[in-house]
Amino acid sequence: MAGGTHGKARTDAMVKKVGAEAAASCQLIVHDCRGDLANVGITSFRTPIFVNKEVVSSDFIVGIGGIYPNHTAAFGGGSKLALGVLGMRSIMHLHYRHKAMGWGILETNSSFRKDLDEIARAIGLNTTISLQVNADREVIRLDCGDHRVYYKEAVAFARKAFSSSISSDPDVVISNAYPNDLSLTFVRMKGMAPLRYCRAGASRVAIASCCEGVGEHGLFPLIVPRFHRARSIFRQLSVLRPTEIRQKVAGRLKQQWATTFARRGKRRPTISRSKSNNPILLYRPGSSCESLPLYIRGIRVTCSWSDVLQTIQKEQGGRKNLKVLIYPCAPLQSFNHHEQQ
C-alpha cells in the first residue's frame, strides 16, 4: 500500500482495497515514508532516491492506480505511483524543487514528471496498470504495460472524458467529492478544486462522507501542528541550493510587485481563485462516520442539508432565482479555464 506521506491505512481499508481472498493469503505491507529505507542513488534533478526496501528486494514490480487530476503533477498515475513508496526526504525534494503544474492540465513532460520517470526507472517500476473510472466507479479504460508508452494518451483520454468548464458567474457552486471523499484531507486536495474559482461572495458547498475522519498528509497537513510553518520553511531551504533560494525569493518579490501593480491599475482577470469571505460548507450525508472538527481552516462542517440551504439563503441575502453550478464528480473533473459555462 503505497501511501506516500498519507499515513498508515486502516486494516479494513486494506481488505477493501485488495479483496478478502488476497488479504487472507498474501503478505500486505503498508509503506512508511519515515521507516527503514534503501538509498538507490540520485536523479539528474538532484533528488535522492530513498525507497522502501521491500521494493528494492522484489524481482518484479507492478504499480496499480488511477489517472486522476492532480495539482502538483497535473495528473496522477504512471511514474507518479513511485512516489508512494519513497522516503520523506525524496518526497520533499519532489514537491519543493519542482513547480506545481496545476489541476488537471494536459501536460506530461514537466520537470516533476521527468524526475519521477527517472525514479521509477531506478527502482524498477517499468510496468503499471492504470484504471480510469466514471462517477459510478465503473472501469471505462484500462492501460497496462510501460507507462512511458501509454501515459500521454491515457491522460488525453481523461481530459476529453471529464473536462469541464469553470465560471465566475454562479451564486452557488456545489462540488461532490465522491469517489475520493474518504477523508477531509483527500477532499480538500481532490474534491474542492471547483470551489477555488468562485466569484467573491459566492456560496461554496462540498459534499463528502469523510468516513475516515480528518486524514493525514506529512507535508501539507490539514490541521497544522505547532511550529509547522517554521519546519516547512526549513525543509524547503534544506533541499535548495543557494542560487535556487535567491531565485525563489526574487520570484516571490516579483509576484508580489505584479499583484500590487495590478491592483493599482484595477486590472482583474475574468476568472481567478476565489477571495470569498464565505467558508466552504462541507455537507456530510449519513452519521456513521468518524467525527470532524466543526470548523477548520475555512471549512465549516454540517450533517444537515437544511443547514446548508439556510446558510446559502443568508449568504445570498435571501435572493431568489440563484444561479447554481454543480460538479457531480469533482475529483475526476479537470477544467478548461478559457470557457464559461
Image: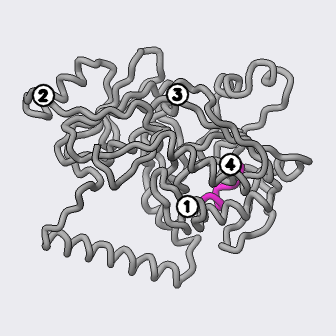
Earlier sequence position, callout 3 versus callout 1: 1
Q: Position of residue 43 (x, y in %)?
A: 72, 70
Q: Amino acid at mark 4?
A: Leu
Q: Amino acid at mark 1?
A: His
Quarter location, residue 271: bottom left
In the structure shown, which secondary structural element does the residue marked by tag 1 occupy?
helix
Front position among marks 4 and 1 = 4
Task: Name the residue tied to disc 4.
Answer: 81
Disc 1 crowd rating (10 Å Cα; few below 14, some 14-19, many 20+) is: some
Task: Name the residue tied to disc 1.
Answer: 95
Q: Is residue 106 above or below residue 261?
A: above
Earlier sequence position, callout 2 versus callout 1: 1
CB atoms of marks 3 and 4 within 8 Å: no
Q: Is residue 105 above or below residue 291?
A: below
Task: Name the residue tied to disc 2.
Answer: 321
Task: Name the residue tied to disc 3.
Answer: 212
Q: Position of residue 251 (x, y in %)?
A: 39, 77
Q: Position of residue 202 (x, y in %)?
A: 20, 40
Front position among marks 3 and 1 = 1
Report the residue at 45% width, 35% height from top: 184
Q: The magenta stretch spans which residues?
A: 85-92
